[in-house]
Every structure is written in structure tokens, then in C-alpha cells.
């Protein structure tokens, strides 16, 4: 007897890593519910997912930063007929000097990357715990491992999300649901398109394979690519007298 298709909800589905992750699920014949605020982009994604042989691809247009997760997430799960994997994959990263100078921009980044994401993660934790199974995978960032002058506002939002998701994973300990924060290094997406030239960026497809695997297995904190675990071990443990002199 054939197994039922995985039911996958992707919040922030139009982001680069989310799109690459959705393609992997589509190729597996999953049932997808893609959620974002850009209806036109969602429509294009739906066509692509069906061409990749997704069993089903539903769409929901919503502004995730203003919606009520406690109300909306159960509706989304009902629309899909349940949820096996829930991915949260949206964030904004205005330049550090801009956010530092304009606190309204800093606030928007904090509310998007931490407050909104955290509330959706908590709603997902409640849903998965109530049904007794499923995976929550949230995109974090290696930036959250240490505050650096280049991006410490953005980094602080990602550090908070890591702590929250790791706490959800601890809450799930000994139970069937699981929670994972995946922490990409610099990745070739629209978010990094205006960054310095010459940087070595991971592909969204490489990161997506780790995100997809994280939904099934592994610990609550995973780096993508995996070499970033070692790199950030070094960065986190640099003594302050040395760290303060390095422009990283």
C-alpha cells in the first residue's frame, strides 16, 4: 500500500531557500501549501511545483507579519488536510547603517524576523504537539552566533529565534514532534544580491537539501553548509581582545 503524501506548509514560500526546499518536496510528490503575500509569485511557484509532480499544491496569500498565527495556522492546516512539516522561511535584512540610523526600519526588522516568526513558531509547536507528530523547521542564520559590527541588529533577531526554537525542541523531548533551527551561512538569494562582490556563497539548493533533511532527522540546531559549525565555533570562542580588532 502506497504511503500518503507528506503534507507540507511553507510560510514565506517565495524566499529563495523556501522555493528550493519546496522543489524538493514537490519532486517527492508531497502535498504543498505555499504561503506568502505576493500572489503573482505564488502562482508561478504553483505551476512549477505541479510540473515537478507535487501531488497537490495549494496557495494562501497573507501578510505573515500582521496575521494572527493562533487563528490562521489551524486554518492553513485544515486547508491542506493536516500538517506533517511546517517550515518558516522569511526574514528581512536592511543594511546595518540604515537600520541603525532609522529606528523604524530597525523595528520592522525586529518585528518581522523575531516577533512574527516566533509567534508562528509557537503556534506551530502547539499544533504539532496537539496532533502528536510532525516537524517544525525554522530558518535562522550563522549571524546569530555572535554580535558583529556589520550586522548586529539582524544578528540579534536570529539569535533570539535560535533560542526559541531550541526551547521548543526541548519542550518536545521524549515526544514525537520535533523542532529544528537551520542556520545558513551566506547564501545566494535575493537577500544577498547586493552584498560585496567576490564572496563565496552557498547555493540555495545546497542549503535546501539540509533544510529538507532536518525535517526528518538530526539535532535541534543545524548549520548549512555544515562547515559553518566549525567556522562559528572559532568565531564564538575568539577572545574579546582579538575579536574586537577583526573586521568580520
Image (cartoon, rainbow, N blue to C red):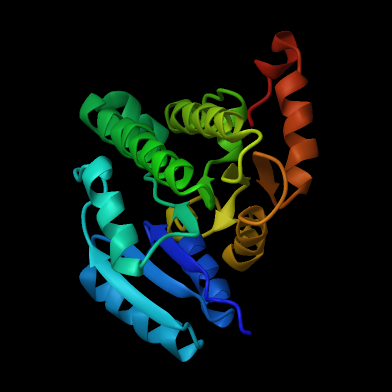
Instruction: Find residue 226 and report its horizontal and vertical position in percent.
Output: 75, 49
22 lies above or below 107: below
The residue closer to the viewer here, 169 or 4, is 4
Quadrant placement of the C terminus: top right
Q: Where is residue 188 in the image (x, y as percent from the top left)?
A: 55, 60
Image height check: is 166 above or below 140? above
Q: In the image as oriented, which residue stretches furthest toward the front?
A: 1
Give the residue furthest to the top: 241
Closer to the camera, 248 or 37?
37
Give me the residue at 51% from left, 87% from top.
Answer: 52
Give left or right: position of 128 versus 3.
Answer: left
- Please state, as top left, top right, bottom left or bottom right, where the N terminus lies in the image: bottom right
How far from the left and from the top, in percent, is residue 174? Answer: 66, 35
Please state if 87 lies on the left or on the right of 176 as rendered: left
Taking depth in this image into account, of 6 and 106 the one nearest to the observer is 6
Q: Which of 20 and 120 is in front in this view?
A: 120
The residue that appears at 43% across and 59% down in the rendered structure is 83
Q: Viewed as shown, does residue 143 lie left or right of 106?
A: right
The answer to whether any part of residue 154 appears in the image is yes
Residue at (60, 77) in percent of width and height = 3
Residue 228 left/right relative to 102:
right
Q: Is residue 45 visible?
A: no
Residue 177 in percent (x, y) is at: 57, 45
Q: In this view, does 186 lie above or below 1?
A: above
Q: Name the residue: 52% across, 32% down.
A: 168
Q: How many marks?
A: 0
In the picture, residue 65 is in which quadrant?
A: top left
Amino acid at each position: 500500500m502506497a504511503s500518503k503524501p507528506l503534507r507540507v506548509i511553507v510560510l514565506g514560500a517565495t524566499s529563495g531557500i523556501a522555493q528550493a526546499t519546496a522543489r524538493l518536496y514537490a519532486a517527492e510528490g508531497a502535498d504543498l501549501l505555499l504561503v506568502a503575500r505576493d500572489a503573482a509569485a505564488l502562482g508561478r511557484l504553483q505551476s512549477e511545483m505541479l510540473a515537478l509532480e507535487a501531488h497537490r499544491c495549494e496557495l494562501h496569500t497573507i501578510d505573515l507579519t500582521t496575521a494572527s498565527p493562533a487563528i490562521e495556522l489551524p486554518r492553513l492546516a485544515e486547508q491542506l488536510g493536516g500538517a506533517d512539516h511546517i517550515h518558516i522561511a522569511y526574514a528581512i535584512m536592511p543594511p546595518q547603517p540604515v537600520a541603525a540610523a532609522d529606528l523604524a526600519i530597525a523595528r520592522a526588522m525586529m518585528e518581522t524576523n523575531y516577533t512574527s516568526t516566533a509567534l508562528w513558531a509557537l503556534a506551530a509547536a502547539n499544533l504539532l504537539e496537539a496532533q502528536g507528530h510532525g516537524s517544525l523547521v525554522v530558518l535562522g542564520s550563522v549571524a546569530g552566533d555572535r554580535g558583529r559590527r556589520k550586522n548586529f541588529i539582524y544578528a540579534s533577531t536570529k539569535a533570539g529565534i535560535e533560542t526559541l526554537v531550541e526551547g521548543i525542541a526541548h519542550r518536545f523531548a521524549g515526544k514525537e514532534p520535533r523542532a529544528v533551527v537551520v542556520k545558513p551561512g551566506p547564501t545566494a538569494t535575493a537577500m544577498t544580491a547586493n552584498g560585496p562582490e567576490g564572496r563565496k556563497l552557498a547555493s540555495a539548493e545546497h542549503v535546501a537539501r539540509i533544510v529538507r533533511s532536518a525535517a526528518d532527522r538530526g539535532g535541534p540546531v543545524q548549520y548549512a553548509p555544515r562547515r559553518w559549525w566549525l567556522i562559528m565555533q572559532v568565531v564564538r570562542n575568539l577572545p574579546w581582545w582579538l575579536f574586537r580588532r577583526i573586521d568580520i
